[in-house]
Amino acid sequence: MKRASFSVTAGIFSFLAAMGTVVLQHAPYAAAGERFHDASYVTTIKDSGGNFASRRVITLHADHTVSVIDSGQGGPTFFFSSQLGSWKPDGKSGLVARTIDFDYPPNADVARLDYRAIPLTAGGQL
């Protein structure tokens, strides 16, 4: 009887140890996911000369989808749709997102945009 009890105890301990390992391996992803999801961020886009180009609102959803709207998307210079895609934690403290948008005529096209977000430290430094 002691042998069966020891086997059951060892089996339960092994299961708990294995589950703890899985949880610990995914803890950074859970923490990053909880930090970012269901939030919207306003960004300022500048051209290569440092001049204001547009503003974007990036929304990260809990299901790991992302949507982006841009103040310049309806023209007068460029005509393109909102961006839709997905995001995931980068394995550190930030995230990466990939979206697509559609350009309207006369320059009909499909574009992929990749984003990388990293949190600022308390001192405002990257």
Image (spheres, rainbow, N blue to C red):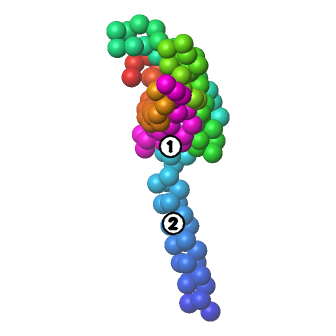
Residue 11 appears anywhere in the view: yes
Looking at the image, which is closer to me, 15 or 32? 32
Q: Residue at x 55, y 84 (%)?
A: 7
Kindly report the distance in space between the C-alpha atoms of the residues bearing marks 1 and 2: 27 Å
Which range is magenta?
Answer: 83-106
- On the image, the x and y values in percent for residue 15 come to 55, 71
> Residue 90 is drawn in which quadrant?
top left
Which residue is tagged 2? 17
- On the image, the x and y values in percent for residue 13 come to 55, 71
- On the image, the x and y values in percent for residue 115 come to 45, 32
Indicate the amino acid at tag 2.
Ala
**Image quarter in which the C terminus is found:** top left
- On the image, the x and y values in percent for residue 43 come to 52, 19
Q: Residues within 10 Å of mark 2 (few under 14, many from 20)?
A: few
Q: Residue at x 46, y 27 (%)?
A: 107
Which residue is tagged 1? 88
Residue 123 appears anywhere in the view: no
> Residue 41 is drawn in which quadrant?
top right
Q: Secondary structure at mark 2?
A: helix
